[in-house]
Image (spheres, grey):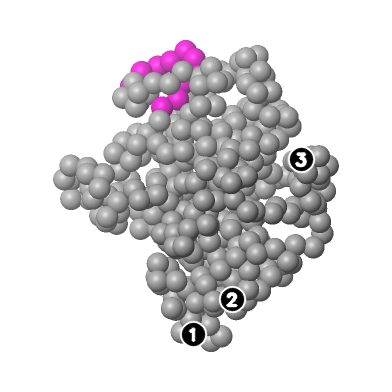
Amino acid sequence: MLDFPVEIVVETCPTRCYKDEEYQQAGIQVTEDISDCDILMGVKEVPVRQLIPNKTYFFFSHTIKKQAYNRKLLWAILDKKIRMIDFEALKDENENRLIAFGRFAGMVGAHNALWVYGQRTGTFSMPRMKDFHDYQEATDFYKTLKIPAIKIVLTGTGRVANGAAEVLRDMGIQEVNPTDFLEKPFQKAVFTQLSSHHYLARKNGSPFVKSYFHEQPNRFKSNFAPYWKVSDVMINGIYWDNNAPAFFTTEEMTSPEFNIQVIADITCDIAPVASIPATLKSSTIADPVFGFDPRTGKETAPYLPSSVDMMTIDNLPNELPRDASESFGNQFLAHILPELFLAKSQTIEHATIAKDGHLTRYFRYLADYAKTPVFDGLVA
């Protein structure tokens, strides 16, 4: 960072994991007024009323999949002529994301999945991840943890799912291959990690080809039933395409063979356009779990015998804030900050959703999502 002419200012905040005093001790100015800054960085979506016109913003906008709940945010970004750079779209030449919280979302999601199961069954107890100072303290606790012989299915092979697998291993839960998971009994807690070819199949019966699935996900169907019949806990860590099939239907969840009692949906796409039909909403760190009754399709209180317990927090890294913040900052310094000083950065350009009141050419597909009587025609 010393190689770049950057002045950093931190907005004062009473609830942040790194206190104002820690920044001040590091020689960083803490202020209530950030309106003179050129670039404003956050993590979660900035509330519409707090957006400052004509600024450059970095944050996760959660608009690039046309999320209905953030449509007004994109309208405001266009109206205020904000240059919006989305962390989620910052990628290298191979389309790999350069900066992400995925690992930490997976880590907290896996921890919470087991916490919910313990709360539901009373077979063991553990603190919330947010109550540990950092992950090292959590791993020290895991050495004392005794989990009964349950079966956990983990979906996905990216940062999120691998972060979840890391925690399951640290808990002492044995990893087994998908075939053994389906066919063998176990006297200890086990988990299996699934790639897309394990839970998807071509509708026409042809062999599974991963590249073809990425190109035309609507030509595939779920093949997840064998897993929901034998699993106690599901941890969903995939990136889901809106045109891909859901893992199961609400009707399938009413089957006496549906064995899953707890679902930690880290993916957290909200139903009905979702990989998990029971993800009715995002839960919160303060109120992390709700029940879902498959017979009615409605939310219930958690831990009821007739319901499946849902953990759908969409800001999971906030439960492991010090570790996640340090990692995210290091990624930004290594991969993104240098790009800001190039005459032209393809990395930054490809991640810029909007600029000068217009959608950029890489996000023209959002035109219908952004279109209102006020914003009609705002595509560059």
From the image, which quarter does the N terminus lie in?
Answer: top right
The image position of residue 367, as x and y in percent, is 44, 75
Is residue 116 toward the left or the right of residue 345 in the image?
A: right
What span is in magenta?
A: 182-192
Which residue, given by chain and number where applicable, does mark 3 sit on? Answer: 26
Q: Is residue 194 left or right of residue 273?
A: left
Name the residue type under label 1.
Asp
Q: Point out which mark residue 208 bears.
A: none
According to the picture, the residue beneath numbered tag 1 turns out to be: 376
In the image, 207: left or right of 356?
Answer: left
Instruction: Name the N-terminal-most of marks 3 and 2.
Output: 3
Position of 217 with respect to 92 (left or right) is left
Dot 3 or dot 1: first in sequence order is 3
Q: Residues within 10 Å of mark 2 (few under 14, many from 20)?
A: some
**Does the stretch in magenta take in 141?**
no
Q: Quadrant of residue 76?
A: bottom right
Hey, what amino acid is under mark 3?
Answer: Ala
Q: Pointer 3: residues within 10 angstroms few (<14), some, or many (20+)?
A: few
Q: Which residue is denoted by mark 2 in the rendering?
A: 81
Is residue 199 positioned above or below 64 on the image? above
- Of labels 3 and 2, the one closer to you: 3
Which residue lies at the image location 76% right of the left edge and 55% below the top edge?
A: 11
Sequence-wise, the earlier of marks 2 and 1 is: 2
In this picture, is 39 found above or below 25? below
